[in-house]
Image: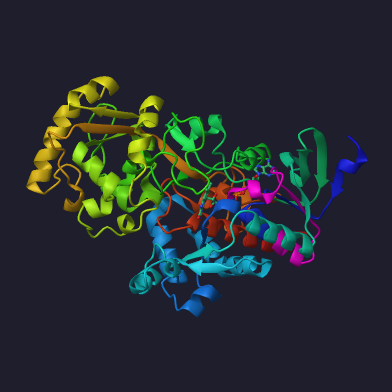
Amino acid sequence: MGNQNIFQAECVVVGGGAAGSAAAYKLAKAGKRVLLMEKGKSLLESDFSRISGFMGCETSFQKAAGITVASKKNLYEYLTEWSKGDVNPKLISSLLDHSAEAVELFSEMGLTYSFYSDWVDSEKKEYYNGDMTWGPLHLINEYGPDRTDTVTNALRDAGVEILFDCAASDLLMEEGCVSGVKGCLHGSEPVEVQAKAVFLATGGFGNNPEMMKEQFNGAPLLNLGSHHNTGDGIRMALAAGAVLEQSTGICCNEICGATDLHNGYIFDDEFRMYNDHLGFAIYGGLAVDAEGERFINEERMATNPLATNGIPALSVGRMYVVMDGEYYEGCCTKGIYEYLGKPDWDYGSHLFVPVLDRAKDQFAQAEEEGWAIQADSLKEIAEKWGLVNLEETVARYNDLCKAGEDKDFCKSKMFLTEIKEGYGYYAFSYVGGFWCTLGGIKTDARLRALNAEDNPVPGLYIGGTEMGSAFGRTYYDIAATGSGLAIASGVIAAEEMNEFLD
Ligand SMILES: Cc1cc2nc3c(=O)[nH]c(=O)nc-3n(C[C@H](O)[C@H](O)[C@H](O)COP(=O)(O)OP(=O)(O)OC[C@H]3O[C@@H](n4cnc5c(N)ncnc54)[C@H](O)[C@@H]3O)c2cc1C
């Protein structure tokens, strides 16, 4: 190895996404010699470059806007109640205590924020500012290169040394303590960074098929996040003696359903689904499993897709949504919200694509790819996809719709739309799309990676989506909690590393 590829630093941050950028900036501002290793050729390749925003708690921006719903008390109680025994409450408490600093740190770097209420009709502003799902959200105004150039420049100005196109692969250890990181620059040049403290924030294992299979029992899940997120941080920490937390989850795609039968990304450059038929997955209509039977209250995916859109894939595998031709037509011309008579369905009132006006032109593509069927009878659909009990299920479902009460899965009346005869039928099959995985290494409230005896591995910190102890199996339904907790983890890790090094 050439000398030019051996670096000295006091601390190393691996991964320049949400958590890593926060940590590197704070460490540099505290006067530490920080080196940031980032697999992408720029921060543009991180998921951080594409997020809408951060959840924040008691930030100066919320105070200025009069938003009080995002108090520590409200958020702590909400998150710990939601995740029950899956998380470390002390860590959640600490993450929330550091949340305001984290949001303000990115503002200091040059990012600016809006609130969800800034984007909606004036009469709904108060509602969204006071709502637990939307009130805590800081939308980042800068997107893509505007965002990542701003953050990259701020990191460099603060004194962070950045190695882009540099994939960390192993931790260096000396007598049980971290002593640096090994990696590879530009795909071929070995790199070694000697440092006493390391923060791993490599964004989860969404693009690691083996880990996905192991953690989710082979469930049909589609990664919508960066291909760089291959669980490297988790793998490195395990090799250094840390252990995995029990529960792992996914941050679900709240925009639409997903298919693994399309050869390419399921969103276009404007972030519209490449084929409008993906929309039906979150409309609350009849959904069945591989036997053609209902298995869930479909309303869950319609009211809370961020948290629940992956549940069908995790519990029964592929999900099939079945409808009649009139319902289909209504969604393509008026949109589902209007078709259902504008019910009390907040999420439906502001869907990303309110009317599926491109669907009809795109049907042939979905059919060719193998995830769409148009048929004259339910029997035809059942036979084609092996949904053996579909006809029986529809008969039962129609009875429940007529009675106006879902005795089987307790779905609200507003989503009980009969599957009518005489209009033909449509069916679509979906897998679970996710933005990132959640969970990994067991950490304490100071973000120290823990071993099987619950002792910290000296010098090793892990955060972002790979901190095992802040997320349960089901993602939180407060918008942008993932990135909100990720940036807070960066702040805590920086504080702790700073102290450790001193
Ligand atoms: C399109 C999209 C939109 C999203 N929107 C939101 C949102 O609005 N709100 C929200 O809360 N969440 C959102 N998410 C989820 C989001 O990914 C996380 O909340 C957040 O980015 C997690 O931060 P992180 O630092 O853990 O990971 P990331 O931001 O993904 O950063 C991880 C970084 O580590 C790098 N890396 C990986 N392996 C290595 C290695 N071996 N060596 C060096 N570097 C490595 C990666 O290249 C990446 O830059 C979205 C995800 C996607 C894909």
Q: Residue at x 23, y 39 (%)?
A: 286
Height in image: 169 above or below 304?
Answer: above
Q: Is residue 324 left or right of residue 225?
A: left
Q: Quadrant of residue 318?
A: top left
Q: Quadrant of residue 433?
A: top left
In the rendered image, the quadrant that contains the N terminus is: top right
Q: Residue at x 45, y 72 (%)?
A: 71
Residue 78 image point, x, y percent = 39, 62
Q: Is residue 502 shown to the viewer in this render?
A: no
Q: Residue at x 31, y 49 (%)?
A: 302
Looking at the picture, tell me which residue is in the foreground, 101 or 52.
52
Height in image: 66 above or below 365?
Answer: below
In the rendered image, the quadrant that contains the C terminus is: bottom right
Q: Work out which residue is located at the far right of the displayed protein and give it.
A: 3
Q: Is residue 358 shown to the viewer in this render?
A: yes
Residue 59 image point, x, y percent = 53, 72
Residue 432 image point, x, y percent = 41, 38
Q: Is residue 468 left or right of residue 461?
A: left
First to last magenta residue range: 24-47
Magenta residue check for 467: no
